[in-house]
């Protein structure tokens, strides 16, 4: 069983929709939770970061961590065609930088 | 935009050749990483370094080797390329005490 599970999609939504992306994990030692965005032919870029449980908001993006359920989410409000990319969740147990990534969810936002 | 560079971007090479994938960063980061990513699959950490002359293998077994002689440079070498090495290789760096990792654009390697 993989330590981090992420539905690969693809996910297709109309412009303006609310998007929910999710990951589940099995290692209760994970404390650092990240979302990366990867455009085609590019390297991933950090989008959101959360330590332990709770919510974090940055513009149209909200990250949620529920450690009791071993479940993290990324919400995108008012989605735009420029949000079309692959979204990767990543986790770390002790800020070592040895990240464990999910498979990535490919999102397409249609104008 | 992060200043981390990888060359070449694309490489097609025959079986048995020795190859070196270059990675350089101009941010002075102590920590550097190599990930392997197959299409539609997760990134797997294959090597990391916390500073000059410090290198460790990651969770995914790899036949590649790395060196860290200078802070800004973290090349990855395959002594004898095989078709099973066909993949995308991503280099990343990060500052000590910080969680962010900055990724390069990747090298897409095809071994025929």
Image (cartoon, coloured by chain):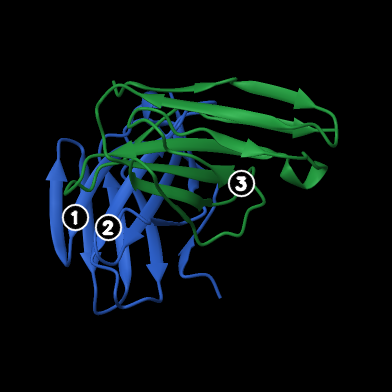
Q: Residues within 10 Å of mark 1 (few under 14, many from 20)?
A: some
Looking at the picture, tell me which residue is in the foreground, A41 or A109. A41
Report which colour depicts chain A: blue
> Residue A48 placed where, x, y %?
24, 45
Mark 1 falls within which chain?
A
The residue carrying mark 3 is B40
| Label number found at residue A107 | none
Q: Residue at x 49, y 39 (%)?
A: B67
The residue carrying mark 2 is A33
The verdict on a common chain for dots 1 and 3 is: no
Q: Quadrant of the N terminus of chain A?
A: bottom right
Regarding mark 1 in the picture, which secondary structure is present there? strand
The residue carrying mark 1 is A50
Mark 2 falls within which chain?
A
**Mark 1 to mark 2: distance in Å?**
5 Å
Mark 3 falls within which chain?
B
Tell me, yes or no, whether the two marked residues, 1 and 2, touch with CB atoms within 8 Å.
yes
> Residue B11 placed where, x, y %?
70, 23
Quarter of image, res B10: top right
The verdict on a common chain for dots 3 and 2 is: no
> Residue B85 placed where, x, y %?
72, 43
Looking at the picture, tell me which residue is in the foreground, B11 or A24. B11
A35, above or below A109, in the image: below
Q: Quadrant of the C terminus of chain A?
A: top left
């Amino acid at each position: 069983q993989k330590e981090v599970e992420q539905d690969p999609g693809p996910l297709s939504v109309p412009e303006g929709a609310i998007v929910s992306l999710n990951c589940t994990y099995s290692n209760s030692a994970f404390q650092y939770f990240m979302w990366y965005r990867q455009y085609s032919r590019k390297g991933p870029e950090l989008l959101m970061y959360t330590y332990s449980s709770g919510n974090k908001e940055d513009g149209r993006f909200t990250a949620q961590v529920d450690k009791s359920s071993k479940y993290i989410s990324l919400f995108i409000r008012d989605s735009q065609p420029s949000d079309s990319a692959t979204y990767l969740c990543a986790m770390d147990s002790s800020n070592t930088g040895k990240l464990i990534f999910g498979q990535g969810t490919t999102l397409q936002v249609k104008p | 935009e992060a200043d981390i560079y990888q060359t070449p971007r694309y490489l097609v090479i025959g079986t048995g050749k020795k190859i070196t994938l270059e990675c350089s960063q101009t941010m002075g980061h102590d920590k550097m990483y190599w990930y392997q990513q197959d299409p539609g699959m997760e990134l797997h950490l294959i090597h990391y370094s916390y500073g000059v002359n410090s290198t460790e293998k990651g969770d995914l077994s790899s036949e590649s080797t790395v060196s860290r002689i200078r802070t800004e440079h973290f090349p990855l070498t395959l002594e004898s390329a095989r078709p099973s090495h066909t993949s995308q290789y991503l280099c990343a760096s990060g500052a000590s005490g910080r969680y962010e990792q900055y990724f390069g654009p990747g090298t897409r390697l095809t071994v025929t």
